C-alpha cells in the first residue's frame, strides 16, 4: 500500500518569529513623557531595605540613613503651598534648609537604586513625584516648552534626576534654569551623576563640577558621598564572550518576544528615531539579539547607542550578541574624550545585560 508524502515538520512550539527594532518607528505624545517620569521597571521594587551596603564602605550605610531622613522630611504640605495657586503668587515661600541632595560616587555603587528608593519612600502620591534621567528632562522641555514644563513639574513635591550630565553647556544652563524655577516653587530635588573609574580623587571632582555648574542652585544641594566598587562586577565572572551569529539567531527564534537585528543596520535606524523615543522603541521586547556587533564609527552614533543601552538596562532586557565584545564598542579616543563617562556607563550596563542573556543560549 502506497503512503502519502510526509507533511513538513512543524516548528517547535517554543520557536517564534523574532521582532525587529529596525522595523519600529514609535511616536510618543508629550503626555506620555510626563506620565512615564517614574523609576524604570528595573527599579519598581527597590527600597532602602533592599539596598545591600558593602560592609567595607560605611558611606553606603550612611547614605541610606541620610536619604531616609530626607524622604521623611518631605511629608506634609508642599513647601510653597499646594495647587496651581502657587503659580500666580508674587513670590513663593522660601524653603528652609537644603532642598536638594546630590549623590556623588562612581559606577555601580547603587546610586540609582538609592535615588529610586528615595522616590518610593517620599510620602506623596506618584503624581506628585517625578523621576527621570537628565536626557529625559531635556526631552520633556523640548516637547512641552520651558514654561509649561515649569508649570507641570512645580506641582510635584520631589524631582529626581538620574545621570546629571555636564557635557553640554547649553543643556546644563537649560536644566539649571528649570531647577531654579522649581526650587522657587518649593520642589525638592535629588540628583546623581557618574565619575570616571580610576580618576584621581574619584567622585570629589564630580561634586565640585556639579555645584559649580549649577551655580546659584548650589546652596540648595548638599553632596552625599557614596564610596564603593561597581556592584555589577563585584564577585562576578568576566563578561561572556560574544556568541556566533548562528547561536544568536537560534536564540532569537527560540525566545518569545525577542528582537533580532543586524547591529550596523540598527545604528543606522537609531539615527532616524529621536532618543526620547528609544524607550518606546524597546516596549515589550523580552530580549535583544544582535548580529555583527562592530565598533561604533563616530561620536554621534556612540551617543545614541548610550541612550539605547540606558533604556535596555532600565527594562532589564538581556542582550545577546555576536561580533566584538562590548568593551570594544568605543575607540580609545572616545574613552579618553569628553563623553567618556557615558561610554563607561554603557559598557558597564551592556556587560550586565550580556550576563543576563547567557541563559538564552542552549548547551
Image (cartoon, rainbow, N blue to C red):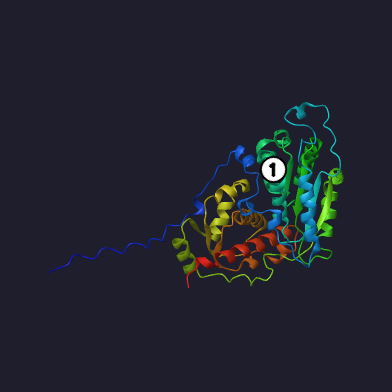
Q: Secondary structure at mark 1?
A: strand
Point out the image quarter for the N terminus: bottom left
Residue depicted at x 60% and y 55%: 312
Examine the image and state in which quarter residue 63 appears. bottom right
Picture coordinates of residue 214 (x, y %)?
A: 82, 46
Which residue does the image show at 67% across and 43% down from the upper left? 139
Say above or below: 90 vs 330: above
Numbered-mark total: 1
Quick check: can you spot residue 272? Answer: no
Q: Nearer the viewer, residue 220 or 19?
A: 220
Q: Position of residue 9 (x, y in %)?
A: 31, 64
- Name the outermost residue toward the left: 1
State the image coordinates of residue 70 (x, y, percent, origin top left).
79, 47
Q: Is residue 118 left or right of residue 94?
A: left
Neighbor class of circle 1 (other Cα within 10 Å; few <14, some 14-19, many 20+) is many
Residue 160 seen? yes
Specify whether 285 is left or right of 143. Answer: left
Q: For this rendering, which residue is in front, 93 or 273?
A: 93
- Name the residue beneath numbered marker 1: 130
**x, y (%) of residue 184?**
81, 36
Residue at 70%, 65% in the rendered image: 231
Residue 67 or 40: which is nearer the viewer? 67
Q: Is residue 96 left or right of residue 267?
A: right
Amino acid at each position: 500500500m502506497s503512503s502519502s508524502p510526509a507533511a513538513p515538520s512543524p516548528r517547535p512550539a517554543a520557536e517564534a518569529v523574532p521582532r525587529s527594532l529596525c522595523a519600529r518607528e514609535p511616536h510618543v505624545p508629550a503626555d506620555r513623557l510626563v506620565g512615564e517620569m517614574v523609576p524604570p521597571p528595573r527599579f519598581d521594587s527597590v527600597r532602602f531595605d533592599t539596598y545591600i551596603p558593602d560592609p567595607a564602605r560605611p558611606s553606603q550605610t550612611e547614605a541610606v540613613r541620610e536619604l531616609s531622613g530626607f524622604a521623611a522630611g518631605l511629608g506634609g504640605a508642599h513647601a510653597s503651598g499646594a495647587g496651581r495657586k502657587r503659580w500666580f503668587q508674587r513670590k513663593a515661600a522660601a524653603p528652609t534648609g537644603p532642598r536638594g541632595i546630590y549623590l556623588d560616587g562612581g559606577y555601580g555603587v547603587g546610586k540609582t537604586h538609592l535615588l529610586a528608593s528615595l522616590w518610593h519612600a517620599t510620602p506623596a502620591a506618584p503624581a506628585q513625584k517625578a523621576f527621570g534621567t537628565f536626557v529625559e528632562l531635556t526631552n520633556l522641555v523640548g516637547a512641552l516648552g520651558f514654561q509649561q514644563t515649569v508649570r507641570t513639574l512645580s506641582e510635584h513635591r520631589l524631582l529626581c534626576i538620574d545621570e546629571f550630565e555636564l557635557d553640554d553647556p547649553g543643556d546644563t544652563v537649560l536644566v539649571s534654569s528649570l531647577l531654579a524655577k522649581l526650587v522657587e516653587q518649593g520642589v525638592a530635588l535629588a540628583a546623581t551623576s557618574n565619575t570616571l573609574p580610576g580618576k584621581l580623587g574619584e567622585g570629589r571632582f564630580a561634586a565640585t563640577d556639579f555645584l559649580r555648574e549649577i551655580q546659584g542652585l548650589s546652596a540648595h544641594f548638599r553632596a552625599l558621598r557614596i564610596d564603593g566598587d561597581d556592584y555589577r562586577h563585584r564577585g562576578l565572572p568576566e563578561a561572556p564572550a560574544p556568541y556566533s551569529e548562528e547561536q544568536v539567531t537560534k536564540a532569537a527564534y527560540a525566545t518569545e518576544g525577542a528582537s533580532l537585528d543586524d547591529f550596523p543596520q540598527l545604528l543606522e535606524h537609531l539615527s532616524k528615531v529621536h532618543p526620547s523615543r528609544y524607550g518606546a522603541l524597546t516596549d515589550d521586547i523580552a530580549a535583544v539579539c544582535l548580529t555583527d556587533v562592530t565598533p561604533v564609527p563616530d561620536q554621534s552614533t556612540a551617543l545614541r547607542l548610550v541612550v539605547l543601552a540606558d533604556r535596555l538596562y532600565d527594562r532589564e532586557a538581556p542582550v545577546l550578541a555576536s561580533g566584538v565584545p562590548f568593551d570594544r564598542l568605543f575607540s580609545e579616543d572616545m574613552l579618553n574624550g569628553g563623553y567618556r563617562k557615558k561610554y563607561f556607563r554603557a559598557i558597564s550596563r551592556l556587560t550586565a545585560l550580556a550576563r543576563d542573556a547567557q541563559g538564552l543560549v542552549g548547551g
